[in-house]
Image (spheres, rainbow, N blue to C red):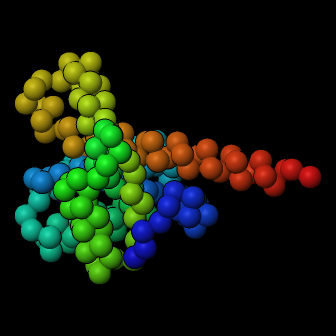
């Protein structure tokens, strides 16, 4: 398993395979998956965290079921751009997953993804209890959608480069 930049992923990603978005929390892992055309992120049920081995097994089973070619995992960078303990925990999780799977990971700055997800759920008039159940997967969808939009932008740039004289 490799940790890739978004540009490296864009070069290596086979067509018509989905990409998963992950929002790593202390109690759950929020999940989202793209369509095969990689245009839309759709939330999935969360993985309830137990311990790393069980979490990794559940994540790998999810990836196999959804035929995931890459994981986009939210990196919880502080608002000032610094990295704190949650970033360290996320990086450690990704390193440990490297021993379990060959599926590449991309670290994606997730600043404000949970805030944005909560606003959307509030606008949809989702009750407080149901918001708590859905927030992590909604945040994973925001993370993944941002990454999908970036992949689309990179693909446009690459196709534009080929047309240049």
Residue sitting at 45 percent across and 42 percent down? 146
* Residue at 65 percent of width and 51 percent of height: 155
Q: In the displayed structure, does residue 81 sit left or right of residue 152?
A: left
In this rendering, is residue 15 above or below 21? below
Image coordinates of residue 85 in percent, x first then y, are: 19, 56
Q: Identify which residue is drawn at 70% across, 48% down.
A: 157
**Which of the pair 126/158 is nearer the observer?**
158
Number of labelled discs? 0
90 vs 150, left or right, is: left
Taking the image as drawn, is residue 82 in sight?
A: yes
Q: Nearer the viewer, residue 40 or 159?
A: 159
The answer to whether residue 83 is left or right of residue 155 is: left
Of the pair 123 and 77, the residue shown nearer to us: 77
Residue 82 drawn above or below residue 55:
above
Q: Position of residue 152 (x, y in %)?
A: 59, 46
Position of the N terminus by quadrant: bottom left
Q: Kindly indicate the quadrant of the structure image that contains residue 50.
A: bottom left
Q: Residue furthest bottom?
A: 99
State the image coordinates of residue 73 (x, y, percent, origin top left): 34, 55
From this view, report whether residue 102 is shown above or below residue 28: below
Q: Position of residue 106 (x, y in %)?
A: 42, 60
Residue furthest to the right in view is 165
- Whether residue 31 is visible, yes or no, is no
């Amino acid at each position: 398993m490799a940790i890739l930049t978004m540009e490296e992923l864009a070069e290596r990603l086979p067509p018509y395979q989905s990409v998963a978005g992950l929002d790593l929390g202390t109690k759950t892992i929020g999940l989202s998956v793209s369509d095969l055309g990689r245009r839309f992120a759709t939330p999935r049920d969360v993985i309830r965290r137990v311990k790393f081995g069980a979490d990794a097994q559940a994540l790998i089973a999810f990836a196999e079921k959804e035929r995931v070619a890459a994981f986009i995992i939210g990196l919880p960078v502080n608002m000032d751009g610094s990295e704190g303990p949650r970033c360290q925990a996320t990086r450690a999780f990704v390193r440990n997953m490297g021993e379990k799977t060959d599926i590449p990971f991309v670290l994606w700055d997730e600043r404000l993804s949970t805030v944005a997800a909560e606003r959307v759920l509030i606008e949809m008039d989702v009750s407080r209890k149901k918001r708590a159940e859905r927030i992590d997967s909604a945040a994973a969808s925001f993370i993944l959608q941002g990454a999908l939009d970036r992949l689309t932008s990179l693909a446009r740039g690459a196709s534009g480069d080929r047309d240049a004289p």
